[in-house]
Image (cartoon, rainbow, N blue to C red):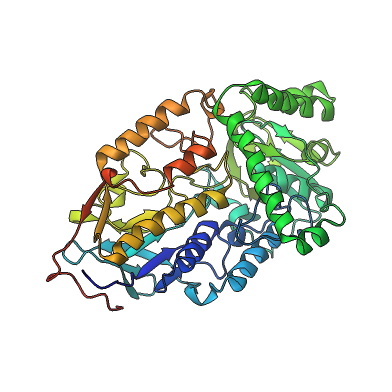
Amino acid sequence: MSARREPRIVIIGAGVAGITAAHVLKDSGFTDITVLEKGADVGGVWFWNRYPGLTCDVPSQIYQFGWAPKSDWSKLWAGGPEIQRYHRDVVERAGLADLIRCNVEVVATDFDDETGEWTVTTADGETLTADFVLCATGVLENPAYPDIDGLDEFAGDLVHTARWDDDVQTAGKRIAVLGTGSTGVQIVSALQPGAARLTHFVRSPQWILWAPMTLPQFPGTSAILGRLPKVHHGVYRGLLWGSGILADIATKPSWRRKAVQGYARASLIAQVRDKGLRKKLTPDYEPLCKRQVISGTYYRAIQAANADLVTEAIEKITPTGIVTADGVEHPVDVIVLATGFRAHDYMRPMAITGVDGLSLDKAWSGGPRAYRMTAIPGFPNLFTVLGPNSPTGSISLQHSAELTAKYLAQWIERWARGDVDRIEVTEEATDRFYEQVAEAMGPTVWNTGCNSWYFTESGNIDLWPFNRTTMEQMFAEPDPADFRLTVADETTRAPASRA
């Protein structure tokens, strides 16, 4: 029987997925863990995004790690800076800080067919050798810039919300906001009061659920939950259970879906009395079809005397303004791009090369695919945490990441015991999973006829179409039948020393 080995594990990314994976693996007894984060601090999307008005659209008491509760959120829906500080605090309290290296960008990850090892290369030319690579790079990472004629010629300030520049002055300026998702809604609400004029350019309006997102956490909540951790855990589990209703609403038609859709329509009717403006703000698709936008302030902001809603298509941008298809030029001083992310890039622009020189770009030429969000054929001992088809629209991402990490820890433990050396999912198992996904996607609300960022270039919906119970069952224990497992000969097995 072979001696127990200590796996060398590299985790790429220190957001929700990477922090969770590091915690679970450390808690499972693994010690050789390195987390590489290209940002200057942890938090992922909460580090990179810091635009005015940034607020999480998930209530604070569920938008947290189940293993690291926070009782003293300042608001029912926390703001971005507070969430980023929470991630930093969790890293410190969980003893993960020494595992994480910030300001280190991974540019390539290559598999060695002969040794079964991965070589991870950074932008500085450093190389690390790993037995396992976990890609926890998330979906809201690479900003999407619109292809508009003249964009590079604008003489004023041009800023993307995902790379906000604090030096940009907006007070007293004529501001144009492009983009209508949660980010666009939030930044319009934040910038409108101080703007000389704010113009929101809307290609496709969004349904917006009203919610009191600026309310502070209820008085006494922090004290009670802080002193009674069992009660706090019960509250979290209860909210997690309650969030299952959201998955039910999203994945199958029911009276619940109709009720929420009715509330979305009522939110618009109750807050926008002007019939002309209301018509311009009314989408031509079912509520919930896109990522749902929640706000208690947007409709008020867009009806202010210094605000305009423009639904004409943008034809071009000049050095001093924006010209729409009706020939009108809108003079502006600042253009804010709230145009979201290239959500299906995942690990790109990293170059990942697997078995026999297979590149990730070639493997994903038809769109991103990963068996149960985690494994890609042709890439042994490389896994994704919150990878393709993650539940970004229905189930807690923290809970999903924890389930995934515990599942992967079981595979890594089998490697450590010497039961297996290479773990590679089969094409057949991946195909079966996507047949299940396609069937389950049919009755979902995301499949009712809108064009959203959930769709890949190949026309597939990149979401999790199952409920939380199904996810928990799929990640309960690895199924060896779905994998090509290789055990090396004891005499040829590479030594387990650290590179």
- Residue depicted at x 31% and y 42%: 365
Q: Which of the 4 quarters of the picture holds residue 354?
A: bottom left
In the rendered structure, the answer to whether residue 438 lies left or right of residue 103 reads: left
Q: Looking at the image, which is closer to me, 236 or 213?
A: 236
Image location (x, y in percent) of residue 412: 35, 61
The image quadrant of residue 419 is: bottom left
Q: Is residue 256 above or below residue 355?
A: above
Frontmost residue, 81 versus 408: 408
Q: Position of residue 333 (x, y in %)?
A: 71, 52
The C terminus lies in which quarter of the figure?
Answer: bottom left
Describe residue 93's horizontal placement relative to residue 389 as left or right: right
In front here: 423 or 392? 423
- Residue 3 in view, yes or no: yes
The outermost residue toward the front is 1
Numbered marks: total: 0
Q: Is residue 221 above or below residue 467?
A: below
Picture coordinates of residue 456 (x, y %)? 43, 37
- List x then y, in percent, for residue 248: 59, 30
